[in-house]
Image (cartoon, rainbow, N blue to C red):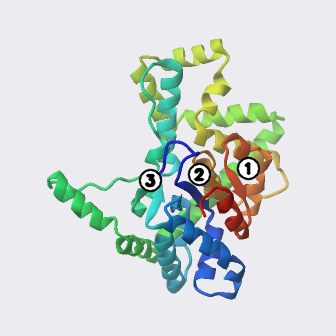
Amino acid sequence: MLPDSKQDFPKCLYLDQIKWIDLARAHYGDRKGKPFQAALQAVRDATKSKRLVLPISVVNLVEATSHSDPERRERLARFMVDLSGNLAILPYMAVCPWEIKNAVRAYFSDRLLLLIRSSLIRRGIHTALGKQLRIAGLPPDREAAALESLDGPEVAVELLLQQGNARELDENARKGDEEIADICERARARSATDNLTPDQRYGVELAEYISKGVAHTALLEALQEAGITLPTFFDQLSERGIVREFFQCIYSLDVLLSLTTRRDRDLVRPIRRNDWRDMLGLSIAMPYCNLVVFENHWGHAAKALKLDEKYETVLITDACELPAQLAELGCI
C-alpha cells in the first residue's frame, strides 16, 4: 500500500481521532463540521486519485468505539471505514520489533534490512491491532478468497460496532489508561526529585522500555540472529560511542522516548489518561507518514522537539489546512 520512500506516491495521512470527528461532522452536515468541508473534499479527491492513503490506527479504533451513544458510534465507524477505504496501519507493538531487528542488522551484521514502510498498511481493521488473519485447513487460493471477504468494509464496521457494544472493554481500557497516567505521574515526580537532565531521563526511560515487554524480546531475538550476547552488545555500543545513535534508529521508540522526556519536564500540566494513546499514535505517524494532523498539545510538543523536521513529516494541528498541505505534497 505504501512505497518504501516517503518521496513516492501514494503519500500517507494520519489523523488524530478529534480530526476524524471534524471530518465526520462535515460529512454528516453537522454545523460544527462546516469549516472542514473543503478539507474532507480534498481528502476524498486525493484518496480517489490513489495519491493518498488514510489508514485507521489502533488509537483511532479504540477511541471511535468509546462513545456511549450507539448511534454516534455507528455513524463514526461507517464514515471512518468508508473514507479510509478500510485500510489500517500497524501499531507500535508490531512495528518496534521490526525496527529493533533492522537496527541490530545495520550495526552488527550484513543481513538485509526489513522493508518496514511498505508493510505498514493493510486492508482490514485487524491490522490496527497488529493481527494477521488466517483460516486453517483451506488451500491458499480458497483461503485468499475467504480472507478477501473477511477484510471487507461491512465486516470492519460490524467488528467496530461489536467492540463498541462491549462496554466493559471500554471501561477496562479507561481504567488501564488511568493507571498508566498515575504511574507516569509518579515517575515524573521521581525524575524531578532526582534532578535528572533530559539526556539522563531519556536513558532511564530507554532502560525501562528495553528491559521488558516486546522491545526486550525483540532485542534478544535480533541479537541471537546476529550471534551476539546481550552483555557483548552493550559493551560494543559503549566502546564505539553509539548508544544514543543506535537507539535513535529505532524510530518509533525514539519518538516515544522524546515525547516522554518532554512530558516529564512539564511539571505543571497534569498527565492525562489519553496521553499514552496520543504518544503511541505519534510514535508511528511521525516516522512513517507524510502528513499528520494532531491535537494541539502533542502536536506542538512534537514540533518543539523538531520531530517533523527529523522525519521529514508535515505536522499540523488544524484540519482546515489539509487542502493546502495536500496540494503542496502533490496529492491533489
Horizontal side, residue 289 vs residue 136: left or right: right
Seen in the picture, residue 212 relative to 267 is either above or below; the reply is: above
The label on residue 289 is: 2
Image coordinates of residue 124 in percent, x first then y, are 39, 62
In the picture as drawn, the residue positioned furthest to the top comes out as 239
Cα gap from disc 2 to disc 1, whole angstroms: 14 Å
Name the residue that disc number 1 marks.
302
The amino acid type of the residue labelled 1 equals: Ala
Cα gap from disc 2 to disc 3, whole angstroms: 12 Å
The label on residue 1 is: 3
The amino acid type of the residue labelled 2 equals: Cys
The amino acid type of the residue labelled 3 equals: Met
Horizontal side, residue 305 vs residue 103: left or right: right
> Mark 2 touching mark 1, by CB under 8 A?
no
Cα gap from disc 3 to disc 1, whole angstroms: 26 Å
Residue 187 shows up from this direction: no
Label 3 packing within 10 angstroms: few (<14), some (14-19), many (20+): some
Which quadrant, please, contains the C terminus?
A: bottom right
Residue at image location 69% in from the left, 83% down from the top: 34
